[in-house]
Amino acid sequence: NAGVTQTPKFQVLKTGQSMTLQCAQDMNHNSMYWYRQDPGMGLRLIYYSASEGTTDKGEVPNGYNVSRLNKREFSLRLESAAPSQTSVYFCASSSRTGGITEAFFGQGTRLTVV
Amino acid sequence: RKEVEQDPGPFNVPEGATVAFNCTYSNSASQSFFWYRQDCRKEPKLLMSVYSSGNEDGRFTAQLNRASQYISLLIRDSKLSDSATYLCVVTGPGTASKLTFGTGTRLQVTL
């Protein structure tokens, strides 16, 4: 009953370092998302992928890249981390059934950039 | 104007009270509407979908007003365990639409 799995759960980076956040879902969902959540800002969409092979920018894409490796996996890469990217990152996937979309979230990655 | 707007609260209510949250959205073509619940330092989880005719799930009632572009969540007989942040979520038209979140409304239920 895994659902959406994100790794790592916690990470501390130095400014300028790079890293990739991994996300996998086992629900055969077409759409996957990366959000960041900052205090008082709610969840803001970084990138999303409506289907395998497609990706689109969200509200705050600068400083990030994504890869939809296959239907299950959607990774988020920080090429050169900045303190402004300190945040909690959530991956989500969704299905559309009967006209209704329901999203399921991973447990989050708490990233600190020093 | 933000796509989805909510009063951040906090709403502090005693146990047993009835509390209501509203959420407004800017895109009149929005298609699906949801309320998610998020506990402190946890991932959001679906509380309920919101249908045009309104819907109820136990102590929770959700309403959609397309003409005025807002949705509401009513919680009756509040429990301590209802303390959380409630997120309004809207999707656009089309099968590939993204989910847009409001900033959330924090509810604190007290004894």
Image (spheres, coloured by chain):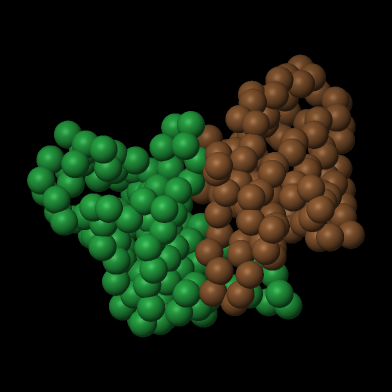
Chain colours: A green, B brown
Residue B38 in the image: above or below residue A74: above
Residue at image x 64%, y 56%? Answer: B27
In this rendering, is residue A15 above or below B90? Answer: above
Residue A65: x %, y % from top left:
26, 62
Q: How many marks?
A: 0
Q: Residue at x 38, y 78 (%)?
A: A54
Query: Residue A2 or A75: which is nearer the viewer?
Result: A75
Q: Position of residue A29 (x, y in %)?
A: 52, 76
- Quadrant where the C terminus of chain B sits is top right
Residue B32, compared with residue B76, is above or below; it is: below
Please give the name of the residue rendered at 36% of the width and 82% of the height, measured from the top-left corner. Answer: A53
Image quadrant occupied by the N terminus of chain B: top right
Query: In the figure, A48 relative to B42: above or below?
Result: below
Q: Is residue A3 left or right of residue A97?
A: left
Q: Nearer the viewer, residue B93 or A42?
A: B93
**Is B66 on the left-hand or right-hand side of B29?**
right
Residue B36 visible to an observer of this rendering: no
Quadrant of the rendered image containing residue A82: top left
Would residue A53 be visible to someone looking at this image?
A: yes
Hey, which quadrant is residue A79 in on the image? bottom left
Q: Residue at x 64, y 37 (%)?
A: B6
The image quarter containing residue B10 is: top right
In-front residue for pair A9/B26 = B26
Q: Position of residue A9 (x, y in %)?
A: 34, 49
Side (left or right) of A12 relative to B111: left
In the rendered image, the residue lying farthest to the left is: A16
Residue B76: x, y in percent? 87, 35
